[in-house]
Amino acid sequence: MRQIALDTETTGLSVKDGHRIIEIGCIEILNRRVTNKYYHQFLQPDRKSDTEALAVHGITHEFLKDKPRFREIVNDFMNFIKGAELLIHNAAFDMSFINRELELLHQDWQPLEHYCKITDSLALAKERHPGQKNNLDALCKRYGVDNSNRQLHGALLDAEILAEVYLTMTAEQVSLLASEGNNIEFLKNNTIKRISSKRASLTLITPTEGELQAHKQRLTAINKACGGKCLWLNLENEK
């Protein structure tokens, strides 16, 4: 299962006003684990950002002057995301900008949803937390995700944060134990290797107080996300 957390920064709020993408950030998630693969690109939009947008992302027109235009990176970008499930917070916004960029190329590109499954993490958060704030900052606080480096918005940083928020928010959807059929299939295809009695003694590493506290905070966040069904936390409380 390949998923990609995606975020963009733009010169303004609407493509109808001629606004363009200035940054794309993508983080790959494979089988619910963030990998070391990512896509990141600043873009020359051929226009300045609105004052309000500039205050959010801090990416100046001068900084973008020597960056490539979307047409120069479209193949690399689309090759990276094709076939994946895209996780986008407020998907309609980012999709409108990417689809507009594809349209402006006049190269027979189809809309983004033709190449990828789209999952709107904002819509998912609203279903789980109706009537509450569900922007990334609020979700980070709710799920115990560290966003202390997020002074300004940046597409790659926001994609990293989104990946962690999404995985925590959907943790209860993943069964901790495989079904009986999957266990049988696993045993058919894997040889169990016995540990030799002559092996060297294992080194016991005792966690620090800070590590124990971080572990407890993460279990608390997982427990909140899965409605009080965190098995690890229950085991900790029974000790």
Image (cartoon, rainbow, N blue to C red):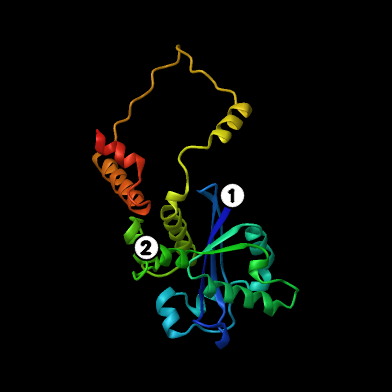
Spot occupied by residue 203 in the image (x, y as percentages of width and height): 36, 24
* Residue type at numbered disc 1: Met
* Residue type at numbered disc 2: Leu
Mark 1–mark 2 distance (CA, rounded to whole Å): 24 Å
From what the image shows, is residue 59 above or below residue 211? below
Q: Secondary structure at mark 1?
A: loop
60 with respect to 141 (left or right) = right
Q: Extreme right residue here?
A: 108
Spot occupied by residue 59 in the image (x, y as percentages of width and height): 47, 74
> Does label 1 or label 2 sit earlier along the sequence?
1
Residue drawn at point x = 59 percent, y = 52 percent:
2
Crowdedness of circle 1 by 10 Å Cα count: few (<14), some, many (20+)? few
Spot occupied by residue 162 in the image (x, y as percentages of width and height): 45, 60
Which corner quadrant of the image does residue 149 belong to? bottom left
Which corner quadrant of the image does residue 213 belong to? top left
Is residue 148 at all visible to an observer of this figure?
A: no
Residue sitting nearer the eye, 62 or 138: 138
Residue drawn at point x = 33 percent, y = 26 percent:
204
Where does label 1 land, which residue? 1
**Numbered disc total:** 2
Where does label 2 land, which residue? 139
231 with respect to 44 (left or right) = left
